[in-house]
Image (cartoon, coloured by chain):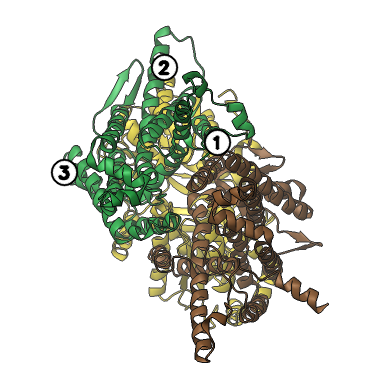
Chain colours: A brown, B green, C yellow
């Protein structure tokens, strides 16, 4: 029994995630407790605000997964995000607040299907490397321009008008068991979903599939020669990324009761790349943490009303990307390793015997 | 449009409308894209601050022109200022990103938001616009801005200039060698670092020229450069990485589609048609027009006849069986 | 009064300062606690709307500062919460939540575009926040928590289109920005043309990011109208005026409800690209009356970098004073009490002249003027200012918010009028 539990927990750890040590997991549990205690300490408003940053976490994870683990840089994760949000809006505006759960599923399904179709066209069409970024960006900008001009009453799906530049207002909150989730309750929904997703993704990237993904990232041609269908791997990873982005977008529409074409704008499309680069491309926890931190910071800076807010954010990003090429978490991880080695060495052990604190 | 009993000559004038609109769209697409394509095609960097390089050119040109300099002088100064600006940026920041081109997107994005807001803080929300040279071309009941049409010829000259720079100069030769294999080029005695600087400076100058040329026609604000981004990225997707061939053919194709639909139907449909063309191009030509041309060359090199090589398996491509450039 | 219940709940569960704020709301001295009364000014100072939003922010600040210097309201100094939403609607949503729930603002001025208004409206309605939306807009918002004090399309086009028909002839061609504001303004253009014996030759919707107007100009020439009605918006669309100049058609006069009054194109674009443009406005800084000049001087004295005092800035300015009067009459900052006072209607001495709040619809009468631009980009105002009432909601729709607290937007053709030009 204990063995089985151990192996189940063991699946969470592996060479493809940062943070496999006991110390990490202790900190992690403390962190999770902190996240769940946060609304009790701060109240409904802060929880509502924080749930936005947490729901962006799915968007960050989606890019981290396909870029960090499979080496495919998508500039268009917000396209799936936005499509899921719009789908959620269209379904709920047609069928009312009672249909929010089917609407949420529909949003995620649409995002996944569109990601699958685009991924199929791209990867089976032979698009690689930086061209994926260009094509996905163009796809997103096309959606932006298109959605911005759907203002007329002819652009409606059932009772739901797409609304063009003005967007789609009046989207109901996601409702579970007759309770409309907002404030704390919405926060807990997002937090639980994010926790489960994070742990599930850790298992996934440390599994056999994760190793294949990393093989494709490290050397696609060699992986192909070893008999892996790299096109299919990239297609599948991209599709799953679309699903994650879809969860994020669906939650976003429910959070703000509103969605507009700016979710497809270049300024928003660049954000997931920024979050993931800062947190560490190959670190799932880094992506979530960086998203929360950067968004919270931009909000606080905006709230000061200073004209320098955007300059400060830009300078900060530039500084981080210059000084921490691999991102924040990998840098912390390597410092932790050096520190631990030094400690163990002091205790007179041979360096070689020291197991890495955090795998790599 | 209600078209009353129009005499035949009106239709000729309508054709002129269409032609001028095409030249206008072509120029905008080509000029919006060239700076981006040079830096992307030669260095593999997606410059998300492309719009802000255009902004530098536009502001420099406008300030000089409003101060009283002749427009041509202002354009030259605007272009040079942007080139110098690009080189300084490359030396101080972007050179650290050559090993990691994807991170350079974060860097250039950060630069972009800082520049937009910095411009706002320094120059305010707007500066006074320069006046548009030339007047109008009149024909029958219609007229068109002569300046905007003349930009089509400027854009052709720019493309020709780029072609000459990369094929006929020593810098061009070395640049192409560096792009193909930097190590070998270095071994052959090419100062690759210098080549990167110059290429980046050249790309910046082209973006600056675009800003300079459009400065009198669009209203001046810190978001000036954002006007060009959608067209620029769509042109890159359709054209591919080849600077001259890809960009010019993309300009012709997209310009024709956009002009036809906005002229015959409405500006709205011109926009929709442009986007639809981009989506279809992504599917049919994953590496853009450049990829199609390279495929054609490869097939020819593999001993196919021109006729065989020209046969693009469009239906197969659409269903996802091969096609495009598979390297 | 679910609004009060909601706020009480938020406060009792919220930050410690909440208790003090609550005491302030019901206290006999009309406010107090550690916080004191606060207003939220959430107006764009960067991003796409920075150009037009900055004068709104500055005007609101100026009004509050003047009031504070004068001893405040009910003896209290008014605090200001003025973040920069950076023209980003998600950020607006966050900041409005913060303003209401954390800063506990007693009145809110927020948002330039109608998209922003729609983005924050669910929050405003949920929290029953006293809110002033001051941009000139398409009209028809009948919403119990919103005071839409800017001029509506009915008022702006209602002054300028009859003038154009009298002056230049009946045939019009309309170009408009392809979104909610432009489309509803285009509907108003049809109705007002019809009411004044005008005729619509054609119309074209222009995508918001469009900068190329070659084909549009050709179509205008083809139709050869007596005047063009333009509801173009934003910096991109200003390219139309340059292309109009370089295509040499400045002799075709233009009527507009947007250009010049908001983004001061006559100051920023080269002359004479705005020549022969006529904008229906309730105010711009060129209005030459003692009240106007005093306000404009105060603005430039206070803000060194200010580029222009636009129509919307003035709307923020007078609505702050209107709120002050309502608070003083109510004797409290309590939002429901203040709203009740406002809903009785109120006369306001604004820089544009004396105007009146219509309590039933939360809209204003306005002194409407025709702002005419000549070849040197000098402004004059032909004719006398004319008071135009916000008749659409009050008379046509029968919006009566004190009796029937709705939260919706009415559209002219969908909800009241028949399309007078169904074939165009």
Q: Residue furthest bottom?
A: A347
Q: Mark 2 or mark 1, which is nearer the start of the sequence?
A: 2
Q: Which residue is mark 3?
A: B68
On the picture, is C360 further left or further right than C353?
right
Q: Residue at x 54, y 28 (%)?
A: C194
| Crowd class of label 2 (few under 14; some 14 to 19; many from 20; radius 10 Å) | many
Q: Which residue is mark 1?
A: B279
Q: Position of residue B241 (x, y in %)?
A: 42, 39
The residues bearing labels 1 and 2 have C-alpha atoms spaced at a distance of 29 Å
Tag of residue C422:
none
On the picture, is A340 further left or further right than C280?
right
Q: How many marks?
A: 3
Tell me the SS state at disc 2.
helix
Dividing the picture into quarters, in which one does residue B216 lie?
top left
Is disc 3 in contact with disc 2, using a CB cutoff of under 8 Å? no
The residues bearing labels 3 and 2 have C-alpha atoms spaced at a distance of 38 Å
Q: Nearer the viewer, mark 1 or mark 2?
A: 1
Between A164 and C111, which is closer to the camera in this rendering? Answer: A164
Q: Which residue is mark 2?
A: B14
Q: Mark 2 or mark 3, which is nearer the start of the sequence?
A: 2
Q: Position of residue A225 (x, y in %)?
A: 59, 48
Q: Is residue B257 visible?
A: yes
Between C117 and B35, which is closer to the camera in this rendering? Answer: B35
């Amino acid at each position: 029994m204990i063995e089985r539990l151990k192996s189940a927990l063991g699946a969470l750890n592996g060479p493809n995630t940062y943070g496999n040590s006991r110390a990490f997991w202790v900190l992690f549990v403390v962190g999770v407790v902190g996240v769940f205690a946060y609304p009790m300490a701060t109240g409904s408003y802060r929880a509502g605000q924080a749930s936005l940053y947490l729901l962006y976490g799915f968007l960050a994870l989606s890019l981290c997964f396909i870029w960090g683990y499979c080496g495919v840089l998508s500039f268009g994760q917000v396209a799936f995000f936005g499509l899921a949000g719009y789908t959620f809006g269209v379904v709920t505006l047609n069928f009312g607040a009672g249909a929010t759960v089917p609407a949420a599923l529909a949003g995620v399904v649409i995002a996944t299907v569109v990601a699958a179709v685009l991924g199929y066209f791209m990867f089976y069409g032979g698009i690689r490397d930086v061209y994926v970024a260009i094509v996905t960006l163009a796809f997103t900008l096309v959606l932006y321009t298109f959605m911005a001009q759907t203002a007329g009453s002819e652009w409606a799906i059932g009772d739901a008008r797409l609304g063009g530049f003005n967007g789609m207002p009046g989207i109901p909150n996601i409702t579970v068991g007759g309770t409309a989730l907002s404030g704390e309750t919405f926060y807990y929904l997002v937090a639980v979903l994010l926790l489960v997703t994070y742990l599930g993704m850790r298992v996934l990237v440390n599994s056999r599939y994760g190793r294949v993904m990393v093989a494709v990232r490290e050397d696609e041609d060699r992986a192909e020669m070893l008999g892996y269908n790299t096109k299919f791997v990239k297609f599948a990873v991209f599709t799953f990324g679309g699903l994650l982005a879809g969860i994020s977008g669906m939650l976003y529409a429910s959070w703000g009761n509103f969605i507009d074409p700016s979710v497809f704008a270049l300024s928003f499309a660049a954000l997931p790349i920024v979050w993931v680069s800062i947190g560490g491309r190959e670190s799932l926890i880094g992506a979530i943490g960086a998203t929360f931190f950067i968004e919270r910071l931009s909000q606080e800076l905006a709230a000061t009303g200073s004209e320098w807010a955007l300059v400060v954010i830009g300078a900060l990003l530039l500084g981080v990307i210059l000084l921490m090429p691999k991102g924040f978490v990998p840098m912390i991880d390597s410092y932790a390793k050096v520190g631990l080695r030094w400690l163990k060495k002091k205790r007179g052990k041979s360096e070689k015997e020291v197991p890495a604190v955090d795998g790599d | 449009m209600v078209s009353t009993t129009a005499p035949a000559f009106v239709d000729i004038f309508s054709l002129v409308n269409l032609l001028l609109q095409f030249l206008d769209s072509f120029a905008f697409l080509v000029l919006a894209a060239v700076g981006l394509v040079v830096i992307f095609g030669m260095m593999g960097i997606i410059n998300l601050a492309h719009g802000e390089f255009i902004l530098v050119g536009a502001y420099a040109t406008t300030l000089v022109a409003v101060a009283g300099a002749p427009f041509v002088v202002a354009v030259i100064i605007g272009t040079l200022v942007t080139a110098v600006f690009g080189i300084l940026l490359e030396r101080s920041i972007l050179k650290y990103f050559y090993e990691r081109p994807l991170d350079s997107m974060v860097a250039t994005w950060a630069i972009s938001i800082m520049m937009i807001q910095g411009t706002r803080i320094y120059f305010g929300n707007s500066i006074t616009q320069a006046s548009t040279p030339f007047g109008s071309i009149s024909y029958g009941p219609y007229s068109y801005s002569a300046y905007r049409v003349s930009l089509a010829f400027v854009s052709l000259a720019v493309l020709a200039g780029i072609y000459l720079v990369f094929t006929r100069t020593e810098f061009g030769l070395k640049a192409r060698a560096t792009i193909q294999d930097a190590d070998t080029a270095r071994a052959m005695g090419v100062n690759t670092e210098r080549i990167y600087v110059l290429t980046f400076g050249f790309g910046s100058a082209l973006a600056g020229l675009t800003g300079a040329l459009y400065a009198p026609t669009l209203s001046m604000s810190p978001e000036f450069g954002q006007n060009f981004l959608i067209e620029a990225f769509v042109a890159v997707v359709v054209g591919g990485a080849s600077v001259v061939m890809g960009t010019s053919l993309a300009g012709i194709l997209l310009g024709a589609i956009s002009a036809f639909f906005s002229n015959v139907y409405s500006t709205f449909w011109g926009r929709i048609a442009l986007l639809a063309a981009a989506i279809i191009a992504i599917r049919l030509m994953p590496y853009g027009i450049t990829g199609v041309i390279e495929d054609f060359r490869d097939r020819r090199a593999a001993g196919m006849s021109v006729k065989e090589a020209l046969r693009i398996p469009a239906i197969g491509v659409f269903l996802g069986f091969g096609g495009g450039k598979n390297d | 009064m679910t609004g009060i219940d909601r706020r009480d709940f938020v406060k009792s569960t919220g930050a410690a300062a909440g208790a003090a704020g609550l005491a302030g709301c019901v206290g006999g001295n009309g406010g107090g606690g550690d916080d004191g009364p606060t207003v939220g000014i959430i107006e764009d100072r960067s991003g796409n709307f920075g150009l037009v939003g900055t004068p709104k922010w500055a005007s609101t600040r100026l009004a509050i500062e003047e009031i504070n210097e004068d001893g405040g309201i009910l003896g209290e100094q008014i605090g200001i919460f003025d973040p920069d939403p950076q023209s980003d609607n998600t950020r607006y949503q966050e900041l409005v939540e913060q303003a209401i729930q954390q800063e506990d603002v007693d009145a809110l001025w927020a948002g330039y575009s109608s998209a922003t208004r729609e983005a924050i409206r669910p929050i405003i309605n949920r929290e029953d926040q006293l809110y002033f939306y001051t941009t000139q807009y398409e009209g028809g918002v009948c919403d119990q928590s919103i005071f839409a004090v800017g001029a509506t399309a009915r008022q702006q086009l209602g002054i300028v289109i009859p003038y154009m028909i009298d002056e230049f002839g009946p045939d019009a061609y309309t170009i408009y920005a392809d979104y909610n504001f432009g489309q509803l303004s285009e509907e108003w253009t049809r109705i007002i043309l019809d009411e004044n014996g005008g005729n619509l030759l054609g119309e074209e919707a222009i995508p918001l990011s469009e900068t190329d107007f070659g084909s549009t100009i050709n179509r205008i020439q083809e139709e050869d109208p007596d005047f063009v009605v333009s509801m173009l918006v934003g910096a991109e669309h200003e390219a139309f005026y340059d292309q109009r100049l370089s295509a040499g058609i400045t002799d075709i006069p233009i009527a507009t409800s947007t250009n010049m009054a908001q983004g001061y194109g006559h100051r920023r674009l080269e002359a004479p690209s705005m020549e022969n443009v006529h904008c229906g406005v309730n105010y711009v800084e060129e209005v030459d009356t003692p009240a106007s000049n005093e306000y404009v001087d105060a603005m430039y004295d206070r803000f060194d970098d200010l580029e222009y005092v636009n129509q919307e800035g003035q709307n923020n300015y007078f609505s702050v004073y209107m709120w002050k009067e309502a608070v003083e009459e109510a004797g409290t900052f309590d939002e429901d009490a203040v709203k009740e006072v406002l809903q009785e209607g109120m006369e306001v001495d604004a820089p544009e002249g004396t105007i009146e709040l219509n309590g039933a619809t939360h809209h204003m009468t306005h002194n409407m003027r025709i702002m005419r631009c000549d070849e040197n980009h000098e402004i004059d105002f032909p004719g006398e200012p004319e008071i135009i009432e916000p008749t659409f909601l009050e008379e046509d729709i029968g919006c009566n918010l004190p009796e029937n607290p709705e939260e919706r937007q009415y559209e002219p053709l969908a909800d009241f009028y028949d399309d007078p030009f169904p074939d165009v």
